[in-house]
Image (cartoon, rainbow, N blue to C red):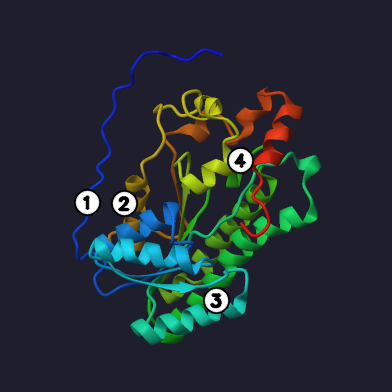
Amino acid sequence: MTTSSTARPTRTPRKEPVFSPDLLSGQVVIVTGGGSGLGLAMSQGLCSAGAQVVICGRSPERLGKAVETLRSLGGKVSGIPCDVRDPAEIDQLVRKTVEQHGKIDGLINNAAGNFLCAAEDLSAGGFDAVVKIVLYGSVNATLAVGRHLIGRGAPGSVLSILTPYAWTGSAFVLPSACAKAGVLAMTRSLAVEWGMYGIRCNAIAPGPFPTEGAWSRLVPEASMIEGLVEQRVPMGRVGEHSELANLAVFLMSDASPYQNGDCVTIDGGSWLGGAGEFSEYTRYDRERLKLLFRAMRPKKGS
């Protein structure tokens, strides 16, 4: 397989804030999985637009570092440890957020888990581990925040982070594909059911946006990135975190008050060029892939 050596003309993504610093002034937004990666980038974007942000995650240490980073940039942010798989912990997250900030206006469902595995090697526990974080976690958080908003009689916004293979499927990530498809169905269902309460439910489906944690589990060898990007992304590059953050801020704000039940894809056109983000791996030797997948799996407790 050859690649084109012709340079693609492109615009350099803006990394500085593009929205008014008071666009989300007075808004309180919870971001699950907000302590690292794309969650941290979106939290920074929300802070730069004036929101009060509450990030949650399972690692108090990681949360503490994220809070310190965001506050050093001028953000109004706090961190609350929470396992989204546990409805009781989600209820506690909502209570603590209301105690600290007086209300909740929005939620970003970003907490996720994923790993590469051939379907025939997948265990019930492995499937369960991903689905409980992605699907159950998103449902737990959405219902808890929704009850709060409905109880207050206040409008709000719920934004869930998906992936294009939520509707196309993809090889080697069966649990994630199933879970993300479920979150997409939740988004569209609640957009209809909760529209009468002024609660908007939308989603973003990012394509390849490299993060240290996720890509270490999803790209077996550096040479395979060429197949995932150069061969599959029409724009010939990966996404910048600031691009995703800007889209999230727009969808959470009153700049998009009529946007409801939508899933916005931000992937440089890659899903249109070939379904399934990791289906490219099917062209590699299967037994070698399986060995690489097993070596990449996180150890228990990590």
Q: Which residue bears the numbered disc 4?
A: 168
Circle 4: is it few (<14), some (14-19), or many (20+) Cα within 10 Å?
Answer: some
Q: Which residue bears the numbered disc 1?
A: 18
Marks 1 and 3 in Cβ contact (< 8 Å): no
Circle 3: is it few (<14), some (14-19), or many (20+) Cα within 10 Å?
Answer: many
Q: Which residue bears the numbered disc 3?
A: 90
- Which of the two discs, 1 and 2, labels the residue nearer the N terminus? 1
Circle 2: is it few (<14), some (14-19), or many (20+) Cα within 10 Å?
Answer: many
Secondary-structure class at tag 4: helix
Q: Amino acid at mark 2?
A: Asn
Q: Amino acid at mark 4?
A: Thr
- Which of the two discs, 1 and 3, labels the residue nearer the N terminus? 1
- Which of the two discs, 3 and 2, labels the residue nearer the N terminus? 3
Task: Quadrant for the C terminus, please.
Answer: bottom right
Q: Which residue bears the numbered disc 2?
A: 246
> Picture coordinates of residue 147 (x, y %)?
51, 80
Marks 3 and 4: which is nearer the front?
3
Q: Quadrant of residue 30?
A: bottom left
Q: What's the distance in space between the residues labelled 1 and 3, CA to CA?
A: 32 Å
Q: Residue at x 48, y 33 (%)?
A: 270
Q: What's the distance in space between the residues labelled 4 and 1, CA to CA?
A: 32 Å
Marks 3 and 2: which is nearer the front?
3
Q: Quadrant of residue 258?
A: bottom left
Q: Amino acid at mark 1?
A: Val
Q: What's the distance in space between the residues labelled 4 and 2, CA to CA?
A: 25 Å
Marks 1 and 2 in Cβ contact (< 8 Å): yes
